[in-house]
Amino acid sequence: MINANEYLYYGKECQIDDLQWSLNAGGKLKLLLEHPEDYKPFGSITKRRGKKAGQILKIMMRRDGDENFVQVDAWFAGWSVSHTKGAVIAMTVEDETFDQLRMLEQREQVEIVVYEIEEDGTSHNEQLRSEVEA
């Protein structure tokens, strides 16, 4: 387990809830979190209207059995919690990096690390990034 800090939003296993790409909306990724209360850290993330208007997040994920993380930038699009489904985090994924996610399937279990990225593209926590990528 990766040590959390104030810029790490989530670092656990979750499921792919939905993964799709469309010409007008771009790449969309929805993650079903392991426990419903796990959405709470995402409550502080900025959500704005528009295709790429939310807080920029670095998403690092790997499938069971994989050694390396796939890394993509995403824009936070919101979260929802329901009694039937649980907690879902929605993100818009950069079109150029969406292809890296195409191998994932709905309901597939993945390990993810989500942390905040500054608007200039630098991460808040380079130590965390190097730990995850190692």
Image (cartoon, rainbow, N blue to C red):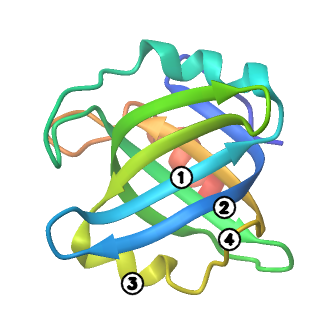
Q: Which residue is under mark 4?
A: 106
Q: Most extreme residue toward the front, as rendered?
A: 84
Q: Which dot, 3 or 4, sits closer to the camera? A: 4
Q: Which residue is under mark 3?
A: 99
What crowding class fits label 4: few (fewer than 14 Cα within 10 Å), some (14-19), or many (20 or more)?
Answer: few
In front: 120, or 30? 30
What crowding class fits label 3: few (fewer than 14 Cα within 10 Å), some (14-19), or many (20 or more)?
Answer: few
Give the CA distance from mark 3 to mark 4. Answer: 15 Å
Q: Are marks 4 and 2 in contact (CB under 8 Å)?
A: yes
Give the CA distance from mark 2 to mark 1. Answer: 6 Å
Q: Residue at x 74, y 31 (%)?
A: 3
The earlier-in-sequence mark between 3 and 2 is 2
Please name the amino acid that badge 4 sits on. Answer: Gln
Q: Which residue is under mark 1?
A: 30
Give the CA distance from mark 4 to mark 2. Answer: 5 Å
Callout 4: SS: loop
Q: Which residue is under mark 2?
A: 16
**Residue 71 % position (x, y):** 47, 65
